[in-house]
Image (spheres, helix red, strand yellow):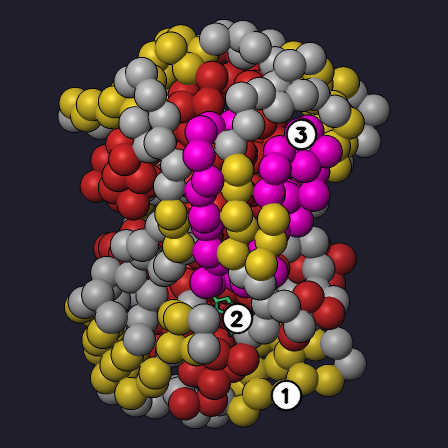
Amino acid sequence: MDKILVHGGAPLKGSVRISGSKNSALPILAATLLTREPCVIQRVPDLSDIHYMLTILSELGAEVERASGTVQIKAEKVLTDAPYDIVRKMRASVCILGPLLGREKEATVSLPGGCVIGDRPIDLHLRGFEALGAAVRVQAGNVKVLAPELRGTTINMRGKFGSTVLGTDNIMMAAVLAEGTTVIDGAAEEPEVVDLANFLIKMGAKIEGAGTRRIIIEGVKELHGAEHTVIPDRIEAGTFLVAGAIAGEEVTLQKVNAAHLTSITEPLQKAGYHITTAADRLTIRPNGSRKPLELETEPFPGFPTDMQAQMCALLATGEGISVITEHVFPQRFMHLAELKRMGADIELEGATAIIKGVPQLSGAPVMASDLRASAALVLAGLQADGTTEINRVYHIDRGYESIDDKLNQIGANIERVKA
Ligand code: UD1
């Protein structure tokens, strides 16, 4: 298994180009199953999660071609049973249910182990499919959705932790080919949902209100092929902003959408960083003193749960006492134990991390537990004294395109040790 060694203390300076959004690209690639015609998707990031999705599509019978960031897909015929071996590796595979149900009126996906029905359930997705007229059966580790026909209706997609992103995507993808009008209330407002809606509209779907809490979909008979460029990855951008904050002299992000990043740039400004925006670029510089922060994760446009771990790493190295409360995934704090091994002073009370800033962390062997937690450890390592050895880096490759190379381009000192 590969390891990453971060030799801390190198000041970051320069520009880095942000990739296309993983969380946009995954459902958009799945949406190509809605038509028999060819689709072309641009700015698709080179990540293992994307590789899994493309493998699932080709195992379902689609012709998939990929050349750097461009993916061409033609799903003339499709099977409706997704392969277990790949599905279990990536929870986002669940977003093939919507398009398969829309097109073939049936789909079967293996549930990837306990985590799906435990910590990360899909009950809201299934409730939405049922409202559209599908029968849902969970048996032998599979979920099967089946509908003689899909009928538009009003569906509330809000659960006890707020709206669901992939759930909204799934229902939107099934409803575009349903009979009549579907209203999704309590829809997720994330930019990735808007990006998917824009792609579906290019394919001939009739969708209004994406990006608000109410999405209205007028079903059409069929969709056609389309070309689309994926939006910039706001979480990769946020991660590089924090890298600039934690160890930067001046770091510029290229090809970003600053409007998607205000919930990240505003707290960084409050903490004392100077951030400037020009066209599709953002630059972050330290501004003298550092202040602690109080943050709560919320669905968009709030502070994203996908940036919580990285922000913990930053605040662990500052001054004063910061507080971060996790409302979206209340158990998402696996990174704290590893940050503490590096000298961070953090207490967890329920879903609230109380972080007392220390002047400097120290390098240590640490274990990546999930995608964003691993990014947080790399960020902490940039600031730490000595070398931080991060194991299980396959987590980071799921969601960051060459994070080590990109950080080295702007002055970091990171080695990847191949297994
Ligand atoms: C997506 C993102 C993920 C991000 C998350 C929240 C992708 C591929 N992944 O995940 O990076 O962290 O949004 O912004 O886009 N829930 C239920 N029942 C359901 C579905 C969700 O209770 O049927 C709960 C979840 O456990 C969680 C909350 O709702 O507490 C939000 O989850 P959701 O928005 O569905 O996350 P994903 O779409 O899986």
| Numbered disc 2: secondary structure | helix
How dense is the environment of label 1, judged by Cα within 10 Å: few (below 14), some, or many (20 and up)? few
Query: Which mark, residue 108?
Result: none
Of pointers 1 and 2, the one earlier in the residue sequence: 2
For the point 41% across and 90% down, which residue is it? Answer: 131
Using the rendered view, name the quadrant where residue 267 is placed: top left
Q: Nearer the viewer, residue 362 or 399?
A: 362
Q: Secondary structure at mark 1?
A: strand
Residue 97's disc number: 2
Answer above or below: position of 135 versus 322.
below
Farthest residue, direction front:
320
What's the residue type where badge 1 is placed? Arg
Q: Which mark is residue 343?
A: 3
Question: Which badge, 3 or 1, comes first in the chain's sequence?
Answer: 1
Identify the residue at image location x=56%, y=10%: 9
User: Pointer 1: what residue?
Assistant: 137
> Residue 137 in the image: x percent, y percent?
63, 88
Q: Which tag is nearer the camera, tag 3 or tag 1?
A: 3
- Which badge, 2 or 3, is on the more N-terminal residue? 2
**Nearer the observer, 150 or 255:** 255
What is the x, y in percent for residue 37? 38, 56
Callout 2 amino acid? Leu
Mark 2–mark 3 CB contact (< 8 Å): no
Which portion, as a residue range, is magenta?
317-346
Is residue 15 at all visible to an observer of this figure? no
